[in-house]
Amino acid sequence: MKIKAYLKPHCGWSMGVRAIMEKYSLVYEDLDIINNQNLYAEMVEKSSQSLSPCVEVDGIMLADVSGEEVENYLLSNNLVKENSIDPSAPTNSACSDEEHERQAKENQESSPVRFF
């Protein structure tokens, strides 16, 4: 199975997709759409929309999906077998307010604003 996951580095939805990939020990391409504009453009072209995550499984694009939706697709198409492993992250939620605050703080520390 060939899987390409168009994900953000820090995003609750993206972490949920990664958790499903880990749960089923799936090999996949983790494509960073934030730090690579070409990958973002590829995702938009293939999915016909700009929201993420998007996961392509053997040429089938699952657009704007949660980890839970990816898992449901994999199970319902008999691409994986159900298991009792708990995912390492929530599979159907955005980042918490605390995570957004931490990310904002990191961005401020790494990218100072300069006025000229």
Image: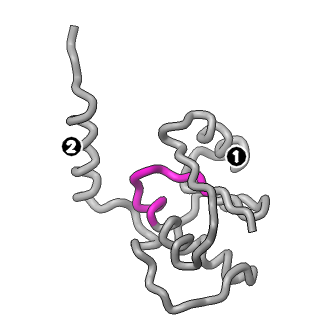
The nearer-to-camera label among 2 and 1 is 2
Q: Residues within 10 Å of mark 2 (few under 14, many from 20)?
A: few
Please report contact status of discs 2 and 1: CB closer than 8 Å, yes or no: no
| Residue 28: % across, % down | 63, 62
Say which element carries label 2. helix
**In the rendered image, the vertical position of residue 63 relative to residue 113, given as above or below:** below
3D distance between C-alphas at marks 2 and 1: 33 Å
Say which element carries label 1. loop
59 with respect to 9 (left or right)? right
| Residue 86: % across, % down | 44, 84
The one of 85 and 52 positioned closer to us in this rendering: 85
Q: Is residue 14 magenta?
A: yes
| Residue 80: % across, % down | 68, 82
Q: Amino acid at mark 2?
A: Lys
**Where, quadrant-wise, is the N terminus in this rendering?**
bottom right
Q: Which residue is most to the bottom?
A: 84
Q: Going from the N terminus, do you reach mark 2 or mark 1 first?
A: 1
Q: At 66% from the left edge and 56% from the top edge, which residue is drawn?
A: 4
Label at residue 68: none
**In the rendered image, the vertical position of residue 97 relative to residue 50, given as above or below:** below
81 with respect to 113 (left or right)? right
100 with respect to 27 (left or right)? left
Q: Quadrant of residue 113?
A: top left
**Where, quadrant-wise, is the C terminus in this rendering?**
top left
Q: Amino acid at mark 1?
A: Ser
**In the rendered image, the vertical position of residue 86 relative to residue 25, given as above or below:** below
Q: Which residue is mark 1?
A: 48
Q: At 39% from the left edge and 53% from the top edge, which residue is drawn?
A: 10
Q: Is residue 57 magenta?
A: no
Q: Which region of the structure is painted magenta?
A: 5-15
Q: Which residue is most to the top?
A: 116
Q: Which residue is mark 2?
A: 105
